[in-house]
Structures are given as C-alpha cells and as structure tokens.
Amino acid sequence: MSSAIFPDVVPGIQNGTEPVNYAKQLLIKSFPWAIGLSFIYFLLLVIYIFKAVRNSTYVLWIIAFFCQVRVVAFAMRALLTKRETAGENFHFVLAQQIIYGIGFFGVLYSAYIMVIDRQIIKRTTQASPLARITENLHLIRLALIAAVSLSITGVIMLNTGSTTNTVTTGKHLRAASAIIFVLIAILLVLQTVFASVAESRRIPDEKDHDSLASFGLYVLLFCGLLLLVREFFMLGTNGNILQYKERLFYPFAACTELLVVLFFLLPGITPQKHELAEAKENS
C-alpha cells in the first residue's frame, strides 16, 4: 500500500520504525483555517436549514447538505493538524480526503438548479434540442454522480495502490472526475448566459409576480465563474503537490466555493417554493 505523494512510503512505517504522519505529507498544517471554515460552515448550515424549513425547496436542502459535509471535512482537517495520532491514521486521512471530495457535487448542482428554476419561473426555458440536454437536471445529476464516483475510486486507488499501474489509474480517474466537473461548470456558465439573454428579450406581462432579484443572473454567473476557477485549479494540479499547498488550496479551492454559498444567501436568488410550483403547473 503506497502513499499518493510519497509512493516509496508504506503506511504506518517510515525508515522501518517511525510512524508516518500522512496529514503532514498532504501539507495539512493550518489549524486556524480548518477550524475557522468548519465554524463558518456550521453557521451556514444552521441558516440554510432554517431557510429550507421556511421555504422547503430542493435546492436549499442540497446546500444545507453541502454545508454539513464541509463542517465534517474541515473539522477532520483541523483534528489532523492538532493530533499526531490522527495524522498517522492512514484511514482517517483517506476518509477526510474522500468526504471533502464528495461535497463539491452539492454546490455545483445547487447553482445549476437555481439557474434552471429561474428559467422556469421567468418562462424562458428553450425548446431546442440542445436546450433539452443543457436544461435537463437529470442528466446533469447523473454526470455529477459519475464524477463523484470516479473521484472516490481515484482517491482510494491513488492512496492504497500497491503497484505503479494502480496509482496511475487512480490519477487518471481523478483527472476524469475533474474534467467532468469542469465541463459541468462551463455548461453552468453558458446556461446562465443563455438564460440572461432570454430574460432580457422577454416582455414582462401580468403573470410576472416572482420575487427573484433582477441582478440574480449576474450573481449566478459570478458564482459559476468562481466554481470554474476552483475546478480549473483542481484539474491543473491533479497528481501534483501544488494541489495540497495551503497557500493555494484555501484561496482557489476552499474560499471560492465558500463565496458561492455566501452569495446564495442574497435576497432574490433562491426561488420561492410556491412560485416554482405555480410556474411548473402553468408550463
């Protein structure tokens, strides 16, 4: 069984006697960043659960789930910085990496749902063959599930592979996962642009009573770009030690998605349940 960054190290043994601290190998060092983000996401989790109870839409529960995953992932990361025994526990480190990787599904899918829900309420959905694909949330969800599955499998093979071929396959699977995430993020940006153009050309009528903010699509477009930056970073540093350097990881991976979740809190961004239900009935 080999380490993803140091393939010549066998888990639990270094130089034949000393245990390996895998957290240090993954350059997990900053306690303030990890515990701070865990606390922020805990507050966001409370806020989103409250919002979801008041306005029980699918997207709000997904964001709440994302926040919960991030609370756990960063709490585990904080523990890795403080406890040598935790850092030396190969399975604990591996679990932290997997849990963190799972979470991105939630924030990207939530952003996509918000764009499509806005189109439904504004009645700007398209009838073209391409739109049937780009606006099909079932296909987007399947693609994201595939990306998460590839990522989990890749992380496990990369960190537990006993042969070079297994480790290489793990890297390829993680790369494939990152590529899918990048493509979905690009599709999100394009879909937001399409929605913005369609909305600007639409003539308002007496049925317009939604509470969505006029600047909402610009916010969602900016969120899409932030997620795209995050995924380009993950793809560009796949299999590279740069991905684990905290001075790069926190601004390009951790903070970009945090900003997206914070922007989702702006008034008029999240559709109201009753408006969405009415729009679907009238479509």
Image: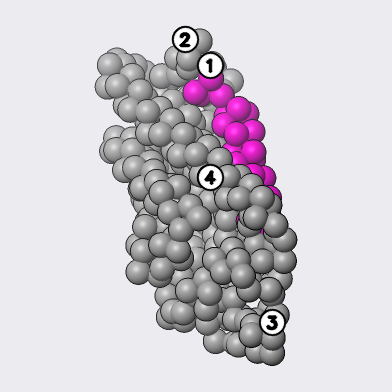
Circle 4 Cα neighbour tier, 10 Å, few/some/many (<14 / 14–19 / ≥20): many
Q: Tell me residue 66's x, y (percent).
A: 56, 55
Inter-mark Cα distance, 4 to 1: 28 Å
Q: Residue at x 60, y 27 (%)?
A: 139
The numbered disc on residue 132 is 1
The residues tagged by marks 1 and 3 sit, at their Cα atoms, a distance apart of 54 Å
The image shows residue 186, relative to residue 106, as above or below, that is above
* Residue found at x 54% / y 66%: 5
What secondary structure is found at the residue carrying circle 4?
helix
Mark 2 vs mark 1, CA separation in Å: 6 Å
Q: Tell me which amino acid carries mark 3.
A: Ile
Return the residue at label 4.
Answer: 175
Q: Secondary structure at mark 3?
A: loop
The first of marks 1 and 3 along the sequence is 3
Distance, label 2 to label 3, CA atoms, is 59 Å
**Does residue 167 appear in this view?**
yes
Q: Nearer the viewer, mark 4 or mark 2?
A: 4
Where residue 265 appears, x then y in whole percent?
41, 53
Q: Main secondary structure of the magenta part?
A: helix
Indicate the position of residue 31 as horizontal and vertical percent values. Answer: 47, 81
